[in-house]
């Protein structure tokens, strides 16, 4: 009987100790959760590095410049694929396109890699509210604005799909090809106010979310995706008024230069026939529109950063500002993206974190868009999924003179390109059988002199060939923990854009154009 009573007492003691331990553990977890850093992730569509913080004195971007003064600016950051859908799939999974198997727009992520844990999904797993506003995964712009586009529903707790005056008045847009907007140059100096535009509405919604998070003290991953400056370049007239169209410079390139390039490179910059050999005045008008749209987006960035400060959230919020790829504005006689030149691969990347040691500093270290996933995991002290092959940039943020990789890797169809601090080597074909390009940025930042066959650079070529071969091989390894992986996934069927107010026959033919 005595032994039985002792056993009962011991059981009660152990139960109470375990309960206390369990409760304390839960309290500790909740406490740690409340102390977690928040993340405001801002991605801008088709934005190149024509920003004040990146040394462009023409473009008016005071708010992005201010963010750069509070964080670290990465001058040598590059996309993994210069096209919206593949780039964003890589960004949100931390993997190369050889690993995601997504090299086209409108490809569903879960059809290719169904078990992957996306960046937003990982934050959800750790108790954050993960919210998407606007374009994070791929959207056909402008046709899919107002919808969820090619989204991944498992990445978010909540989503907002803004739809503004730019869509309602789409019929007013100037375009090189009638009723064609997303794949061709198109632009509009719009009437009305910022908050009537899709991106203005997105900013207003983001501000509301910040207010809610501040009131409830909820840890958050807020992903705000702006649709501009993707074509059509739509912005309120006041942003056009910031620029003197007559003073906008358009690059002039000799046609002889094409003979120095491999055939795939020539095809990449000659593919858009309607955008070749534009008259100077028309080119100036279009480039002014792109710049006006950047300034419009900059104003929205200012609104969201002001609200972050107003709520006191800037003290415990990481801010990331970036783009999915670059954008040509007449360089190499090309407009838009889809090349392996610097104009297309290079992206803006600014990361501001509380207690950043190197505020306002810049680094030339080669970094990649897929490094953002690993970096945010590191900064928030969350364990990254094993499939994330990007590298944390936190060491650079702590020591601006260090590097985390020798080169950045970008793929476009059957070509690969690496960018080091000084050189760019581009290889066309699986083994370079379709040709090479080599550019020395010390003497040729515009990448107009192909040195691939220059004997003075033979040692550099040999070294960089080894580097690019190793980079491609590593980017093709199936990552640990990726789960199922399916190849040859077909993109979704893409219907023609319908401009509100036009009348169509059953076969899609427009029989009435709204004027």
Image (cartoon, grey):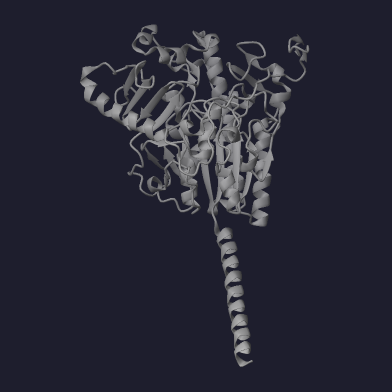
Q: Residue at x 39, y 7 (%)?
A: 255
**216 or 490: nearer the viewer:** 490
Work out which residue is located at the far front of the displayed protein and give it.
1
| Image height of 374 relative to 163, above or below | below
Q: Residue at x 62, y 28 (%)?
A: 139
Q: Is residue 82 left or right of residue 135?
A: left
Residue 425: horizontal and vertical position, in percent? 34, 24
Q: Is residue 229 left or right of residue 172?
A: left
Q: Is residue 485 left or right of residue 360?
A: right
Q: Quadrant of the C terminus?
A: top right
| Image height of 319 relative to 327, above or below | below
Report whether residue 310 is seen. yes
| Image height of 512 relative to 218, above or below | above
Q: Residue at x 42, y 28 (%)?
A: 410
**428 or 324: nearer the viewer:** 428
**252 or 182: nearer the viewer:** 182
Q: Quadrant of the N terminus?
A: bottom right
- Quadrant of residue 316 within the rendered picture: bottom right
């Amino acid at each position: 009987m005595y032994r039985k009573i002792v056993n009962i007492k011991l059981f009660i003691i152990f139960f109470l100790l375990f309960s206390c331990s369990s409760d304390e553990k839960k309290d500790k977890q909740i406490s740690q959760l409340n102390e977690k850093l928040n993340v405001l992730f801002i991605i801008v569509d088709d934005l190149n590095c024509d920003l004040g913080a990146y040394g462009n004195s023409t473009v008016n971007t005071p708010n992005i410049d201010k963010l750069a003064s509070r964080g670290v600016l990465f001058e040598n950051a590059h996309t993994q694929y210069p096209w919206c859908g593949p780039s964003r799939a890589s960004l949100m999974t931390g993997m190369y396109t050889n690993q995601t198997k997504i090299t086209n727009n409108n490809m569903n992520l879960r059809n290719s890699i169904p078990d992957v844990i996306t960046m937003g999904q990982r934050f959800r797993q750790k108790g954050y509210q993960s919210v998407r506003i606007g374009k994070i995964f791929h959207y056909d712009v402008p046709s899919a604005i107002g919808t969820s586009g090619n989204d991944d529903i498992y990445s978010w707790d909540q989503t907002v799909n803004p739809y503004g005056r730019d869509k309602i008045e789409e019929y007013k847009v100037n375009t090189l090809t009638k009723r064609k907007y997303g794949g061709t140059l198109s632009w509009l100096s719009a009437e009305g106010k910022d908050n009537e535009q899709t991106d203005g509405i997105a900013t207003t919604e983001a501000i509301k979310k910040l207010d809610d998070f501040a009131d409830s003290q909820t840890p958050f991953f807020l992903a705000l995706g702006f649709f501009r400056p993707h074509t059509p370049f739509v912005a309120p007239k006041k942003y056009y008024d910031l620029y003197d169209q007559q003073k906008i410079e358009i690059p002039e390139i000799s046609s002889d230069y094409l003979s120095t390039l491999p055939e795939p490179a020539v095809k990449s910059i000659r593919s858009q026939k309607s955008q070749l050999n534009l008259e100077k005045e028309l080119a100036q008008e279009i480039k002014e529109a792109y710049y006006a749209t950047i300034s419009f987006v900059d104003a929205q960035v200012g609104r969201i950063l002001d609200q972050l400060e107003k709520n006191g959230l800037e003290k415990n919020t990481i801010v990331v500002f970036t783009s999915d790829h670059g954008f040509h504005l007449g360089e190499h006689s090309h407009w838009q993206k889809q090349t392996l030149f610097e104009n297309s691969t290079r992206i803006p990347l600014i990361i501001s974190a509380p207690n950043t040691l190197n505020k306002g500093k810049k680094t030339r270290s080669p970094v990649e868009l897929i490094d953002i996933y690993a970096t945010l995991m590191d900064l928030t002290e969350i364990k990254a999924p094993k499939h994330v092959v990007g590298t944390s940039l936190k060491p650079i943020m702590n020591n601006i003179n260090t590097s985390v990789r020798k080169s950045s890797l970008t793929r476009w169809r059957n070509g690969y390109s690496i960018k080091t601090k000084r050189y760019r080597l581009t290889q066309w074909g699986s083994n370079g059988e379709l040709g090479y390009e080599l550019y020395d940025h010390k003497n040729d930042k515009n990448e107009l002199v192909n040195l691939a066959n220059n004997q003075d650079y033979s040692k550099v070529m040999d070294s960089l060939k080894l580097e690019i071969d190793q980079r491609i091989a590593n980017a093709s390894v199936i990552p640990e923990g990726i789960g199922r992986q399916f190849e040859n996934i077909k993109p979704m069927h893409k219907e023609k854009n319908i401009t509100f107010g036009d009348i169509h026959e059953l076969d899609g033919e427009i029989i009435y154009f709204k004027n």
